[in-house]
Amino acid sequence: MARLIRVEATGPYKIEPKDFPTDGKSIFICACGLSNRLPYCDGTHKNCRSVEQPGKLYTYDMTTKQVMKEEIDNGGPTP
Ligand code: FES
């Protein structure tokens, strides 16, 4: 499974030292691309786990975080 994410940012996310916990708690950085709180994980990845299947490529509506398109993942670039 894989997903296409539309990204319009042209620069990095800045994480200030004050954002690092001093109590030993972990910080989770979003790797699925769907978080509403990038660069932090907000749990939206749970949608991926419940919907996506191996061998498929998914395109999400970034407003609703719902799958707009599902196709066979051939591993290549898409138009
Ligand atoms: S990994 Fe993306 S929201 Fe959790």
Image (cartoon, grey):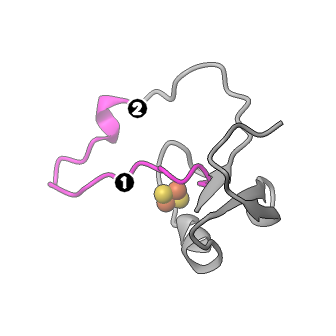
Which label was assigned to residue 69?
Answer: none
Disc 1 target residue: 28
The kind of residue on which mark 1 rests is Phe
For the image, the number of numbered tags is: 2
Pointers 1 and 2 in contact (CB under 8 A)? Answer: no
Compare residues 54 and 25 and report the one nearer the observer: 54
Mark 1 residue crowding within 10 angstroms, few (<14) / some (14–19) / many (20+): few
N-terminal label among 1 and 2: 2
Q: Residue at x 31, y 35 (%)?
A: 18
Residues 79 and 17: in front is: 79
In this rendering, position of residue 23 left or right of residue 50: left
Circle 2 residues within 10 Å: few <14, some 14–19, many ≥20? few
Q: Is 76 one of the magenta-colored residues?
A: no
Question: Magenta part of the protein: which range?
Answer: 15-35
Residue ID at (65%, 19%): 10
**Residue at (77, 53) in percent of width and height:** 62
> Residue 15 got which mark?
2
Which secondary structure dominates the residues rendered in magenta? Answer: loop
